Image: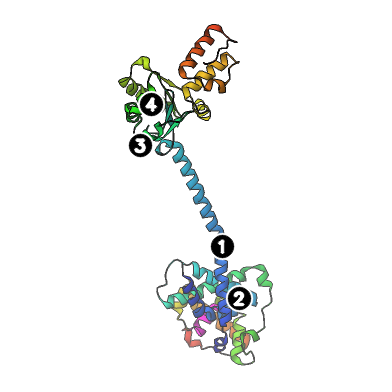
Amino acid sequence: MATEQELHNAINKYANEVRKICFIHCKSEADVDDIFQNVFIKYFERKENFESEAHEKAWIIRVTMNACHDIFRTWFYRKAVLTDDFNQFNIEVTNEDGQLIETVRKLKPNLRNAIYLFYYEEYSIKEISSILNANERTVSTWLVRGRKELKKMIGGDYLEENATT
Amino acid sequence: MRQLDKIQVSEEHKQKLYEQVITKKARETKPLLVLKVAMSLMLIVVMGGIFFLQSPQKDNGLILSAVAMETEESLILNLNSENKVVSVEVVSDRESSLNQVVNVDGMHVQQAILAILDLPAYQESMQGSILEVSVYSDDQNIEKELTSQINDVVYSRMQKEDCHIQQVNKAVFEQAKQHHMGVNKYMKIQSIVEVDDTYTLEELKQCSQDELDRIEKECGKNGNGHRRGCE
C-alpha cells in the first residue's frame, strides 16, 4: 500500500491529468469528484510498486478511464444530458480547438479515449493498446473511426490523418 | 486540443481531495480493524480458556491442596499442583510461636513435614497429644497420591498410635478456619453437637482434644441429652 506521502505526491502530480480525462468523459462536476476519489483510493490501496514514472502515469490514466466507463454504464448516466458548462474548465468553445474538444466529448468512449491519448497525450498506438488493454489494430481502427466521426460532426480536418498510418 | 492544458486543479482542491481519500480510507479500515481486534481478543480468551482447563496444575502459585497438622494447635500447609508448600497458616485460639519458627515455603510436602516434626517448638506442642493430619485436594487423583506420601513420611517418624491421618473435604477445612480451630477439633465438635444438641460449638471450642474425646465417648454411651461439658 502507498504511504500518505506517496498519495500526496501522486495527487499533486496527476490531479490535472485525471481532471482532463474526467472532463472528456463526465457529464457533471459531481461525477468528477467521485472519480477523483475512486482513482486515488485505488492508488492508495495498490500493493505493487510502479516500474517507472511512465508506468505510474499510464496506470492512472487507465484507472481513470475505467472509472469513467463504470459511471457511463449506469442507466441514469446514459440518460443524463452532457454538461455544456465550459466556464468552470476555462475552455473557449468559440474557437476551432474548443469546438474540437466539445465534439470529442460526444464520441463513443473507446473512440474518445483513443483520440485523446493519441492526439493530446501523444502516446503511440502500441502504448495506447497497452493502456486500454486492446489490440494495436483495434486502436488504429478506433482512431480512424474517431477521426471520421469528428469530420462528419465538425465538417473539417482538425486532426492529422497521417499520424495513424 | 491544446486548450485542455487550461484544465488545472487548484492546490486547495488537491488538499481537499487528499483529505477525502484519507478519511474515506480510514472509515473503511476502522470497522475492519475493530473486527480484527475483536477476533484476536476472542481467540486469546478461547485459547486461554482451553489452556487453563487443560493444565490448571501448571500454575505453581495456585493452591490446590492443603494439609493440616494438628495437636493443640493447627498448622495448615497450602500446597500447589506439585505438592510444594505455597504458604503456611497457624490456626489457634491462643498465641502461638510456631508462626516464627516454621519456615517451609517452597519445600515439597514430605520435606516440609519432616522439617516441622524436627522442630523443637513443634515437638514441645505435640507432647502428650496425638498428631491429627487432615488432607484435602481439589483434584481427587492428587488427594490419593498426597495422602499416600503423607502416610509414608509421618509413619517413618511416628508410631501408629501417636498419629492419625484422614481425608476431608474443602468445606470442613474452610469452616474450621472460620472458627479458628483445627480441622480435627472442628469435626469432633460437629460430631458431638450432632449427637447432643445441648452442646454448642462456642462452648466446646474451649475444650482440649482430650476433653473432646472424653465428651464424645460419653455421648456415645449415654445417647442424646447427655450433658456434662468440659471441666
Dot placed on the residue nearer the N-terminal end, 1 or 3 = 1
**Looking at the rendered structure, which numbered label has been put on residue B146?**
4
Secondary structure of the residue carrying numbered label 4: helix
Q: Which mark is residue B28?
A: 1
The reply, left or right, for residue A130 in relation to residue B5 is left
Question: Residue B91: x and y, percent?
Answer: 46, 29
Quarter occupied by residue A55: bottom left
- Residue B65 position, x and y percent, is 43, 30
- Left or right of A102? Residue B63 is left
Q: Nearer the viewer, residue B74 or A79?
A: B74
Snapshot quadrant of residue A111: bottom right
Do marks 3 and 4 share a subunit?
A: yes
Label 3 marks a residue whose chain is B
Q: Which label was assigned to residue A32?
A: 2
The residue at the point 48 percent across, 47 percent down is B44
| Mark 1 or 3: the one toward you | 3
> Which residue range is magenta in the image?
A111-121
Q: Main secondary structure of the magenta part?
A: helix
From where the camera sits, is residue B142 visible?
Answer: yes
Q: CA distance from mark 1 to mark 3?
A: 55 Å
Per the image, label 2 sits on a secondary structure element best described as helix
What's the CA distance linking mark 4 and mark 2?
Answer: 80 Å
Query: Mark 4 and mark 1: span between their CA atoms?
Result: 59 Å
Query: Where does residue B105 sit, x and y in percent of width and height?
Result: 37, 36
Q: Chain of mark 1?
A: B
Which residue is tagged 3? B106
